[in-house]
Amino acid sequence: MPSHPSINMHDFLNDDLKKEKIIGIWHNGDDIPEKARIAVAAGIGNNTVYDVVTPIEKGKEWLFELTCKYQPRTGAMIMEGGPLLFREENYFGKLKGALVVEVNGKVVRIYRDFLGYNPSDDDYETYGETTGYEMSLPDGLGQAYYTRFTGMSLLPGPVASINSHALPKDKSNWNSTRYYMDDYEDIKDKQLNWFYERFPQYSLYNEHGDRLDYKFSCWLDTNLGYRDLFRDLTPQEEYFRVSKPPADALFVRQDINNSPIYHVVDGKLDEMRVLNNPAEAVDLYCEHVLLGREERFDFIEHGRPLD
């Protein structure tokens, strides 16, 4: 399995696809325009502006402090990488862009939510409907990847897609089992039938018509992600998209705190496994990705069959 394709920082900041839209690069608080501070302060009412001001002002050390504490290998690689920056873009007159850091020649995008909706925000607990998803992850994983930010992705190209890629996903892209199985149409029905029999509490709908399958969520997928990358595919990339190379996915139960982490290979839900030491396995995997290693990471040796 090839290493995950990624863009470097120079190309990310200078690609012709984005040159006309890039209106600024923020490295520190002095770079932040007043209109951006006002837009971020408007929070969710603005509907498009996430809080990228706080991490630029507080800095890289603050943003990744918990990553370093709970995922030391990954945190060390990030801290040894380039400076944190925000690529500001003009998007129909509204603030848009990507918060990124370069690690080992790769651009890693860091996701943030609206002001007040990031778990580390002072008033986060006042937003009851959004509180707690990060608590479902055990062994410091919620603190490491979903407290001061809400996930990350390895960017394969200059377009800062909303779709997560290779690393712990942006929380808005945690997938239900049914959505995850869309990549495996040839075995989808059989696997979903097994899943709903094994975990009846996550049947697709309850008696009130509410979706329940999202509570068993895929929060990390090693698939190259070409289903979501719809532009500028090389013939080699198109081949991998069609042939669906072997991929691992990690799931969590959002309805409980400190959930087990479930490991699924190639869409085979009925061969589901459980990680023995999730924090160690994920830390080693993320380091593996950031180092650009060619071989497939072996989650199997870090887990056991589902009881």
Image (cartoon, rainbow, N blue to C red):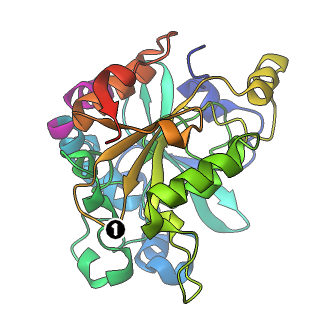
| Residue ranking furthest to the bottom | 208
Residue wearing tag 1: 255
Q: Residue 74 in magenta?
A: yes
Up-down relation of residue 231 to residue 9 (above or below): below
Q: Residue at x 44, y 60 (%)?
A: 199
Report x, y in % for residue 196.
Answer: 53, 60
When asked about the image quadrant of residue 6, the answer is top right
Q: Residue at x 29, y 69 (%)?
A: 132
Q: Residue 62 in magenta?
A: no
Q: Residue at x 71, y 35 (%)?
A: 226
The answer to whether residue 217 of the structure is visible from this angle is: yes
From the viewer's perspective, is 4 left or right of 85? Answer: right
From the viewer's perspective, is 150 left or right of 195? Answer: left
For the stretch drawn in magenta, the main secondary structure is: helix
Report x, y in % for residue 134.
Answer: 30, 59
User: Three-letter amino acid code at disc 1?
Assistant: Asp
